[in-house]
Image (cartoon, helix red, strand yellow):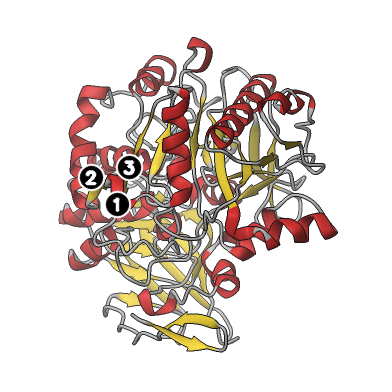
């Protein structure tokens, strides 16, 4: 699609809307209250839900998928930042912890966060898998056992290493800086085919290059006979029977409301099924369980965020952080920081003007000066593997007295040590590339002109709202484990004490990962879904 000029702006030429498949139903196509039955209801269509629906539909189950967000195609991804941020992200891209200290970036449309993520594919580190087996009783996911699952997923989403000549100037900062410092950095593996390097990955892909679940697992599930209801907000899951008899899980009823964009009254949607797979993500999944009376124990506990902040480098030449493949490189020199399993790693994100202006430190004239220099800014984000103190949860998700979601999270002592070290390393990368100034994300920014100024980072506050922190890796809260008091599900992903109610999303992860989670979620859910299919093989023949 070639751009068309409008005034001084270059906007993409409009694309024709593709018709939705007949088994994709939206609020616009459902004019009345609806009740259906199925073998499996999958709630949520992100990296977890879409994979679960695909695997179970392929196994012969009658699958119904429910998604709170809209069904969109490439024609909807207009690259209009303001409108798409509101439409594609949870809470209109304004989701935060209760105290506002952490911005939480999660997708909310058919395809979930896979629709808006930055495409990097990283396998779960071996030491993390060993930790899960040792401390959570997870089985069948050792490095050798799960390696074929990773192979399969990478093939399904066309995962390939980014060629050396395809890195944006911003990603070259990380690669070149690491080389100058003698640190380990490498080209990333991304799930894209025929990528045009436009840089708008966070707003959906109008070129159908990003191989999100919208283009991979969801179409496969639909082709295998699944039905998808978009615009459908699930309010609760009700257990209709005490016992299904003959080993069959009891029937459950999923209650949802279908909301249209035209202001028409919502329609009630109910689905009866013996199997329910909740894949709403680490915020919505525990909230739904609690609203449905299936909370308690580890549900909502052990929220993990990979606490993330950024260091901004000011250069004498153009960087253009809003262009090119977003995360085409990774520096993992410090992933085993201080000989521990808990460290940090660094990426270079895309920064478009609206997002940059909201995140940029400073106020008034200082902020305006930074934005006027937008073309010459380089950005490196530093992500910390949280949870080094296994006995102390950092955060939780709960329902308050008014039924609203409450999200609490705070950096512990160990996270603070690693965040400071990560800031220091990111600043070093900038200076190794010749930045004339490096600026932190503190409310009162630390401004450094050379490596001699780096010690100033050690005394800058990391208290809530004294530094901009965010996370696009929202995991935990229903983690797998053998102890119902400290975990949400069994190692098979089934909610403790509730037969036939499964979790299949990032909330399952027993610990944070130390790598971006999309490949891990797809792999873990593939294992869980295939266990469900074997365990309940008689249901689809009933």
**How many angstroms separate mark 2 from mark 1 (CA)?**
8 Å
Quick one: label 2 or label 1, which is nearer the N terminus?
A: 2
Could you tell me which quadrant the N terminus lies in? bottom left
Residue at (19%, 39%) from the top-left corner? 151
Residue 89 location (% of width, % of height): 55, 62
Task: Answer yes or no: is residue 194 visible.
Answer: yes
Q: How many marks?
A: 3
Rate crowding at label 3 as few (under 14), some (14 to 19) or many (20 or more) other CA atoms within 10 Å.
Answer: many
Residue 480 location (% of width, % of height): 43, 30
* Label 2: which secondary element: helix
Q: Using the image as rendered, state which of residue 225 and residue 142 is in the foreground.
A: 142
Residue 498 appears left or right of 360:
left
- Tell me, yes or no, whether the two marked residues, 2 and 1, touch with CB atoms within 8 Å: yes
Q: Using the image as rendered, state which of residue 23 and residue 296 is in the foreground.
A: 23
Could you tell me which quadrant the C terminus lies in? bottom left
Instruction: Give the residue at mark 3.
Output: 525
**How many angstroms separate mark 2 from mark 3 (CA)?**
14 Å
Q: Using the image as rendered, state which of residue 394 and residue 43 is in the foreground.
A: 394
Q: Residue furthest top?
A: 339
Instruction: Give the residue at mark 2.
Output: 154
């Amino acid at each position: 699609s070639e751009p068309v000029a409008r005034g001084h702006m270059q906007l993409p030429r409009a694309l024709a809307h593709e018709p939705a498949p007949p088994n994709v139903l939206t609020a616009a196509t459902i004019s009345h209250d609806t009740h259906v039955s199925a073998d499996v209801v999958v709630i949520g269509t992100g990296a977890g839900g879409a994979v679960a629906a695909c695997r179970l539909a392929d196994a012969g189950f009658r699958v119904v998928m429910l998604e709170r967000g809209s069904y969109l195609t490439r024609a909807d991804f207009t690259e209009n930042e303001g409108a798409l941020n509101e439409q594609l992200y949870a809470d209109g891209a304004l989701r935060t912890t209760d105290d506002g200290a952490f911005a939480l970036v999660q997708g909310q449309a058919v395809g979930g966060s896979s629709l808006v993520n930055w495409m990097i594919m990283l396998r779960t580190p071996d030491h993390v898998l060993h930790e899960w087996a040792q401390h959570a009783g997870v089985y069948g996911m050792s490095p050798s056992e799960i390696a074929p699952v990773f192979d399969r997923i990478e093939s399904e989403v066309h995962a390939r290493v980014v060629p050396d000549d395809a890195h944006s100037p911003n990603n070259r900062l990380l690669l070149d800086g690491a080389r100058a410092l003698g640190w380990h950095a490498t080209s990333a593996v991304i799930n894209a085919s025929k990528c045009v390097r436009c840089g708008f990955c966070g707003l959906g892909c109008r070129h159908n290059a990003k191989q999100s679940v919208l283009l991979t697992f969801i179409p496969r599930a639909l082709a295998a006979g699944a039905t998808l209801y978009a615009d459908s907000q699930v309010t609760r899951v009700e257990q209709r029977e005490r016992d299904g008899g003959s080993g069959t899980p009891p029937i459950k009823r999923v209650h949802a409301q279908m909301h249209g964009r035209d202001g028409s009254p919502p329609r009630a949607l109910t689905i009866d099924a013996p199997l329910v797979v909740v894949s709403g993500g680490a915020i919505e999944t525990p909230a739904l369980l609690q609203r449905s009376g299936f909370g308690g124990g580890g549900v909502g506990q052990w929220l993990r965020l990979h606490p993330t902040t950024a260091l901004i480098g000011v250069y004498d030449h153009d960087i253009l952080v809003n262009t090119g493949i977003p995360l085409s490189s990774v520096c993992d020199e410090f992933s085993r920081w201080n000989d521990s399993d808990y460290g940090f790693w660094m990426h270079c994100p895309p920064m478009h003007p609206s997002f940059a202006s909201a995140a940029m430190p400073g106020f008034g004239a200082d902020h305006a000066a930074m934005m006027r220099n937008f073309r010459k800014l380089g950005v490196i984000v530093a992500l910390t593997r949280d949870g080094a103190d296994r006995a102390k949860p950092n955060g939780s998700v709960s329902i308050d007295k008014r039924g609203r979601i409450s999200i609490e999270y705070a950096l512990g002592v160990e996270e603070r040590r690693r965040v400071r070290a990560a800031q220091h390393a990111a600043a070093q990368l900038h200076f190794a590339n010749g930045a004339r100034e490096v600026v932190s994300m503190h409310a009162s920014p630390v401004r450094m002109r050379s490596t001699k100024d780096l010690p100033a980072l050690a005394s800058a506050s990391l208290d809530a709202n004294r530094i901009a922190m965010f996370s696009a890796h929202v995991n935990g809260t229903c983690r797998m484990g053998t102890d119902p008091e400290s975990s949400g599900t069994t190692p098979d992903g089934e909610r403790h004490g509730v037969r036939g109610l499964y979790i299949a999303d990032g909330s399952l992860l027993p610990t944070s990962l130390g790598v971006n989670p999309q490949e891990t979620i797809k792999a873990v859910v593939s294992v869980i879904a295939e266990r469900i299919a074997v365990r309940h093989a008689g249901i689809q023949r009933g």
